[in-house]
Amino acid sequence: MTDQTMHFQAEVTRLLHIVTHALYSQKEIFLRELISNASDACDKLRFAAQTDDALWEGDSELRVTISADKAARTLTVADNGIGMSRDELVSNLGTIARSGTGEFVSKLSGDAAKDMALIGQFGVGFYSAFMVSSKVEVISRKAGESQAWRWTSDGSGEFTIGEAERAGRGTTIILHLREGEDEFLDPARLRSIVKTYSDHIPLPVVLKDGDRDETVNAASALWARPKSEITEQQYKDFYHHVAHAFDEPWMTLHARAEGKLDYALLLFIPGMRPHDLFDPARKPQLKLYVRRVFITDRCDDLVPAWLRFLRGVVDSADLPLNVSREMLQNNPVVARIRQAIVRRVLSDLEKRAGKDAGAYAKFWENFGAVLKEGLYEDQEHCEALLKLARFRSTTRDGWVSLEEYVAAMKEGQSAIYVINGDQAEQLKRSPQLEGFRAKGVEVLLLTDPVDDFWLSVVHEYAGKPIKSATRVGTDLESVKGDEPEKKDEEKAEGAALGTLIALLKQTLGDAVKDVRESKRLTDSAVCLSADDNDMDMHLERLLRMHQKLDQARPRILEINPAHPLIRSLAERATQPGASDALADAAQLLLDQARVVEGEPPADPVAFAQRMARMMQKAL
């Protein structure tokens, strides 16, 4: 079969342009990425061979081999891992075949250092080889297959693929180095890079120097070593390997349990939000080992989905080596390890939040929305998660905890008030908060989509009910504030107001659930509110956006009796012919309330016509 030339996916072409033109100060990280990928390939072979011993092909000593040819100016990184088929070479090296591709492209900034970090974050570190190479060849034979394949590219937008020869399974990557990159042909330099970045790889990394083969890494599982023997830099290097990340870990958790259960943990919370954090699959990405033998990186039961931002390794001595992914489901050993991980992570987060509020705020900005999923899904840990939760509010800058909120509650205030929406600054201007603002009552601003759901199952904190500020039953009269009462003469008279309310109800009909005098409005003429037993208005809007609801439910229209417009309308409502004269005004009041809530008018054409008529009358 002749070689076939194919074009890279557009996203890969852009990525390669960044890499090949990057003036990056640490070019040597390409070797870390290639060694890390080779180690993963060996892990995958070890797992697959548990159920198919023939895949070993008589070669069970897994290793990564590095060799340099000064005459040819090539650097070769080879492994005897799982290998790749032709289709896998095209898919893995020709496309970014994973969720988040669009996000990846949107985040590319043109800043070399930032974009290189992003390349690592998206798990495409292979392309970093083009920082030092004018051409890259990949020769691979998949375990269990006889045909090898060669993938070749100069990084300019296309690649060729064709048949090749390889003595055994695995992958060989040959880098044809650019001019000026001769340092990567020096055995001493290569030895130093491996010791710096890949010493933790739990299989031998062998450097071939002439006739001499030298294992240049410790080749031991970092998580199995005592913490006292591990430096901060070694932890960081292992995080870069296991998470395929370029950022610094925000927190490192290294623990070992012996007794009824025997397992080791080496877990990390990333310093940056992973690109696939909000992938609909919500899959955890911890690697499970059994007695230092890789089993899987897709054990969904190892941690709950609301801790899917964790990266790292769990190594159990109590599971069988031939355990399958199906056997891991509902496994009692896995369930107990899961409980231990959850308790430890929540405990360490609580300690960090108490010691360093600034650092914890950074964590919450990255992962708070994910952690709050546990409030809805995990009642067992709900109380601990509520302690960790942080919110924006109407009365202070930065983040506030529920404990801090309760401590600052006003005299006479009996509930924790919240309001849901899309943007904090927009929520602060909501008419529904005018009464709270006048009394100095703090309201928490909830802007994550998950907030609408956990509020349906979490109803109180520390004995204080959690109430939506959009509910009509919200009672502020008992709260002692500094705002003086409005004088009676500033309000529409009771009889006139009652007449106006009756007229509005008649005119609007089924478009509203009710029309009521507002106890909360101070500046705005109208607002919409939900009855105590109705669905939250923001949740309803989300469900309609996702076609889970057919249409909006009628809401309560609140009118402000102290507003000049309402006073004028109330006075006109007592005069003959008011029903016809105020028909347009009634509809416009409802449309105004909808627009303030972020809703379009029910009938935009009719809205425009009414507005034109009202303007004509005024002029």
Image (cartoon, helix red, strand yellow):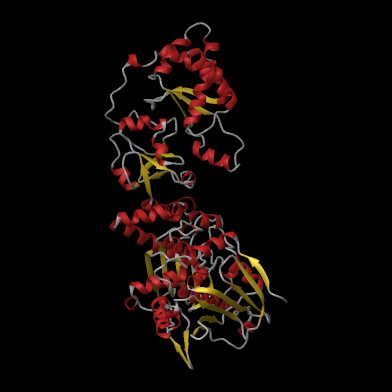
**Residue 197 visible, this angle:** yes
Residue at x 58% of width, y 76% of height: 137
Whole-percent x and y of residue 129?
A: 50, 72
Where, by quadrant of the figure, is residue 552 drawn? top right
The residue most toward the front is 179
Residue sitting at 58 percent across and 24 percent down?
510
* Figure check: 391 above or below 185: above
Query: Can residue 504 be seen from the camera position used here?
Result: no
The answer to which quarter of the image holds residue 352 is bottom left
What percent of the width, then of the height, locates residue 530?
Answer: 48, 32
Mark count: 0
Seen as rendered, the residue at the extreme right is: 1
**Who's the residue at 46% across and 70% down the image?**
242
What is the quadrant of residue 98 in the picture? bottom right
Looking at the picture, tell me which residue is in the foreground, 527 or 411: 527
Task: List x then y, in percent, for residue 421.
Answer: 46, 40
Residue placed farthest to the bottom in the image? 211
> Which of these two is toward me, 472 or 574?
574
- Residue furthest toward the left? 482
Q: Is residue 437 left or right of residue 108?
A: left
Viewer-proximal residue among 114 and 530: 114
| Direction from residue 552 to residue 5 in the image, left or right | right
Above or below, 534 relative to 12: above
Residue 432 lies left or right of residue 155; in this view the side is left
In the figure, 264 relative to 399: above or below? below
Quarter of the rendering occupied by the N terminus: bottom right
Q: Position of residue 16 (x, y in %)?
A: 53, 65
